Image: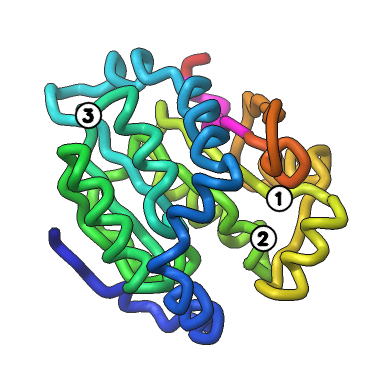
Amino acid sequence: MEQIANRGDSPFEGLARAYSNVANSWHNSICKLGFMDAYEAMVENIDLDHLHRNRDDSYALRVLDAGCGTGGFSLALSTHTLAFSLDLMDLSSEMLDQAAALIKQEGVVARTIVGDIASYDFDGPKYDLILCAHLIEHVDDVGKVLRSMSKLLSSDGQIVFVVSKPHWCTYLLRLKWGYRAFAPQEFLQLLQKNGFENVEQHSFSDGPPSRLSMGYVAKLKRKPNEDS
């Protein structure tokens, strides 16, 4: 496991400590609540064949799991393909340790990045796929974060979100974690205003995810001179 520190200063130290305190039990919790099933459902909506076909070499897909927690989204991806290189990013180094260990059991060696996406000092190849589950809810300037993500994504890449939607349970999460919630139309408009298009919305059929969250798959907006 290679671990690097995000060189930007993060304003989320308190939140990082809160998540570090629950890192050891987090993965079991999201499994019991049905969120691993939700992530599996979202991965099924990613056109992995398209992403592989659009690579200009034989190297694995480059994937970023932003705000990865214990890596549930990446674990779901690993059940569909192992042909990817993975960067795991989170505020909590304890969460990252858990995520890297879990994903290694599936045969994927990840690089871990401690920090937040808005201040990510990016200097590598762009990502073919960005996974982002329940990160946006903590952000004050959502547009800034979405624009930052758009700069990290390759021109033919895809970005996949799972985002909290309004519900009384979401309100309780807000009291504990500082969560926000986004009505689907609101988040759709935010994506469209900040560099994304061809957005697909996906509802979850069972359990807490069906009440608390909505999934989105989006692509970068093409510039006027790009081929459609």
Q: Residue at x 23, y 34 (%)?
A: 84
**Is 170 colored magenta in this rendering?**
no
- Mark toward the start of the polypeptide (3 vs 2): 3
Q: Is residue 123 or residue 89 the one in the foreground?
A: 89
Residue 175 placement: quadrant: bottom right
Q: Is residue 105 above or below residue 43?
A: below
The stretch in magenta equals 216-226
Say which element carries label 1: strand
Q: Residue at x 69, y 37 (%)?
A: 207
Read off the residue under disc 2: 137
Crowd around label 1: few <14 · some 14–19 · many ≥20 (10 Å): many
Q: Amino acid at mark 3?
A: Leu
Q: Residue at x 62, y 57 (%)?
A: 136
Q: Amino acid at mark 1?
A: Ser
Is 221 displayed left or right of 109 in the figure? right
Proximity of marks 2 and 1: CB atoms separated by less than 8 Å: yes
Residue 205 position within the rendered picture, expressed as x and y whole percent measured from the top left: 70, 26
Crowd around label 3: few <14 · some 14–19 · many ≥20 (10 Å): few
- Mark toward the start of the polypeptide (1 vs 3): 3
